[in-house]
Image: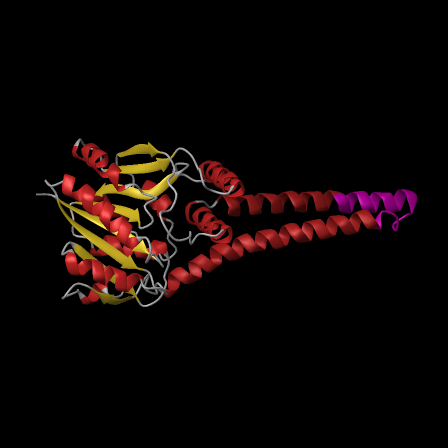
Amino acid sequence: MKKISIIVSCYNEEESLPLFHKEVSKVMKELSSYEYELIFVNDGSSDKTLEVIKELKVNDPMIRYISFSRNFGKEAAMLAGLDFSTGDYVTLMDADLQDPPKLLPEMLNYIENGYDCVGTRRVTRKGEPPIRSFFARCFYKIINKISKVEMVDGARDYRLMTRKMVNAIISCREYNRYSKGLWSFVGFKTKWIEFENVERVAGETKWSFWKLFKYAIEGIVAFSTLPLTMASLLGILFCFIAFLMIIVIIAKTIMWGDPVSGWPSLACIIIFVSGVQLFFMGIFGEYLSKTYLETKKRPIYIVKETSDDKVNEEKKLL
C-alpha cells in the first residue's frame, strides 16, 4: 500500500485542530487503499495547540508531531514537515480548513495518472478585504513579468506531491524561503485544481497586510534580480540628465549671466534624485541582507520536541 503524508503547519490553532482532524479522518477512511500519517508542526504556538495535538494523538496512532523551540514561520514549518515525512505522496494543508480535505481523492487520481504534483488555486477571494485582494492580484502580475519562474495567481500551498518532487524541494536549503516560487522552480508536471474560497472554521488569520507585504517582497527578492538591473539603468539615466543640466546651466550663465534664477526647480530636482537614490539603496540593502543571512548558515528551524521515539540527530537542526 502506498503511503500519504499529510503535513499541517500550526500556529495558535487550538480551536481549529479538532475540527480539522475530524474532517481529515473522514476523508482518509474513504481512501482505505492508502496508508497515511498526519504530521502536525507546532510553530512555537503560544496557546494550547501542542496540548490539543497530544490529546488527539492518544486516540489516533496515525498522528506524529514536531514542536519548534519558538516561532520560525510557516515556511520553516512546511520544510520541517517535508523533512520528517515518510510517505510516497506528500500533501500540505492549513489547519483552518481553508484547504478542503475533500479534494484529496481527486488529487490522488491525477497523481496516479502521471502527474508529479497537483496544486490548488482559488478562483475567488471571497471573505478577503478588497484592498488585500487588489494588491495580491497586482503582486502576481508584477512577479510573473520580472521572474523567470511562473507563479499562479490564487495558488495555495495546499498540494499533493510525489516523493521525487518532495526530495527536490528538500534539496533547496535556502534560509530565506518562498515556497510558492520553489514549487515552480523545481519544475515537474503539475495539474491545477480550482475551487471556491473557503473561510476559516475558527480563529483569526495570522497574516496581516504588513506580513503579506513583507512576504511579497521576499518573493520578489528571491526570484528576480530585475530591481537591481532597473536601479543600474535609472542610475545611468539620471547621470545623463544631470550631465545635460550642467551643460544647460553653464551655457545659460555664459549667455545671460543669470546663474541664480531657477534655484527652486533645481532644489526640487536634487531632492527628487536623492529620493530615488535612497530608494534604490534600499533595494540593494534588501538583497544584501538576504545574502548576509544566507552566509550565517543558521538552522532554518530548531525542534524542541517530537512524537518520534528516535529522531536522527541531523534532523534536529536543519
Residue drawn at x 49%, y 38% as measured from the top left: 142
73 vs 272, nearest the viewer: 73
Tell whether position 192 is magenta: no
Residue drawn at x 37%, y 51% as measured from the top left: 202
Tell whether position 255 is magenta: yes
Q: In which quadrant is the N terminus drawn?
A: top left
Residue drawn at x 88%, y 48% as measured from the top left: 261
Q: Quadrant of residue 64?
A: bottom left
Q: Position of residue 304 (x, y in %)?
A: 27, 68
Q: How many marks?
A: 0
Q: Is residue 198 visible?
A: yes
Q: Is residue 318 visible?
A: no
Vertical order, 34 against 54 (above or below): above
Q: Position of residue 315 (x, y in %)?
A: 22, 63
Q: Position of residue 84 (x, y in %)?
A: 21, 56
159 vs 278, nearest the viewer: 159
Vertical order, 196 against 312 (above or below): above
Q: Position of residue 255 (x, y in %)?
A: 90, 42
- Colour mapping used in the image: secondary structure
SS majority, magenta: helix
In the displayed structure image, the side of residue 314 where residue 277 appears, left or right:
right
In the displayed structure image, the side of residue 232 where residue 141 appears, left or right:
left
Q: In which quadrant is the C terminus drawn?
A: bottom left
Task: Check the image and name the residue furthest to the left.
Answer: 1
Q: Which portion, as a residue range, is magenta?
A: 245-263
18 vs 145, nearest the viewer: 18
Residue drawn at x 22%, y 61% as measured from the top left: 55
Vertical order, 8 against 304 (above or below): above
